[in-house]
Amino acid sequence: MEAPLYFFKVFTQDAQAGNPAACALLTEWPESSVLQHRASEAQQVVTAFVVPTTEDPYRYQIRWFSCQQEINLCGHGTLAAAALLRQLKGEGCYSFVSPYGEPEVRVRADDLVMQLPQWHAKPVQRPAALASAQIIDAFQTRDLVLVLADAEAVLQFQPDVELIRQLPQHALIVTAFCPPDTYALRYFAPAIGIEEDIATGSAQCSLAPYWHAKTGLSRFKVLQLSATAANFAVAFHSNQLYLKTQAVALPHLTRSVATIT
């Protein structure tokens, strides 16, 4: 089986910004080791692979891989897959099937709107080893979340990569509210090969419900204080959570034949 491997920048309309991802549309699933090998070769933060289902032309199976391992519910990998389907199949509402949820993305020329699951906060003991940070609240979902005093504290947070790697949670998020309608974050997932992510869709599954409950707001601008600019927003409609952003293709990087065997 042969399939082109496409490259995108997600959470941006600028090819010099955003979070990089690769994506391939396959006809069937090869062995996981083959997918991991191709993801490692792609050298992107994440590579998404999609396979069409038989029952619906807008419904696809999806799997996500970092350079090191398969990962779960990757927001920006899903958006890259949606951008690829926009390029190859056209606009529409695409759903993606995985063991970790079934995100949907409404795909139009000028934006991508992804429906996200909501992960609600569970109590967690504040890690003593991270006590040097000015933590005002802590909770866990899939990830460990530390709430700091303000955006400056988020920006100045010094991650201990080896300590974070040993946490039982998937990743560490630090966050703070920035009045009137913005929250800031940084996202660290060294256990899956991402020391600090540029822009993280899945983090909003934890943060948007938390800040919605704390502030009563239904719309937020999201400021991810990584080294590379990205742009997205989240909103609640009829108790559903949506993330709105854009993605840009990098056609000069597309590999015309990426062999998947």
Image: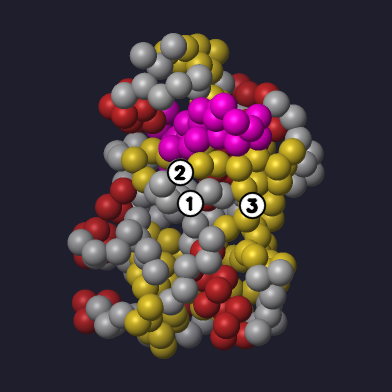
Circle number at residue 98: 2
The quadrant holding residue 187 is bottom left
Q: Residues within 10 Å of mark 2 (few under 14, many from 20)?
A: some
Tag 1–tag 2 contact (CB < 8 Å) = yes
Residue 183 is situated, as x and y percent measured from the top left of the image, at: 58, 73
In front of the other: 51 or 157: 51
Query: What mark, if any, has residue 129 been given in the picture?
Result: none
Q: Quadrant of residue 135?
A: bottom left
Q: Nearer the viewer, mark 2 or mark 3?
A: 2
- Please, is residue 260 above or below residue 196 in the view? above
Q: Amino acid at mark 2?
A: Ser
Assign the C terminus to one quadrant of the image: top left
Task: Specify which label sits upstream in the sequence, 3 or 1.
Answer: 1
Residue 53 drawn in magenta: yes
Report the side of 54 relative to 161 (left or right). Answer: right
Q: CA distance from mark 2 to mark 3?
A: 15 Å
Q: What residue did someone put label 3 on?
A: 114
Q: Residue at x 70, y 26 (%)?
A: 89
Front residue of this view, candidates 70 and 30: 30
Residue, disc 1: 101
Residue 41 position, x and y percent, is 37, 25
Residue 4 to residue 54: above or below: above
Q: Residues within 10 Å of mark 1 (few under 14, many from 20)?
A: few
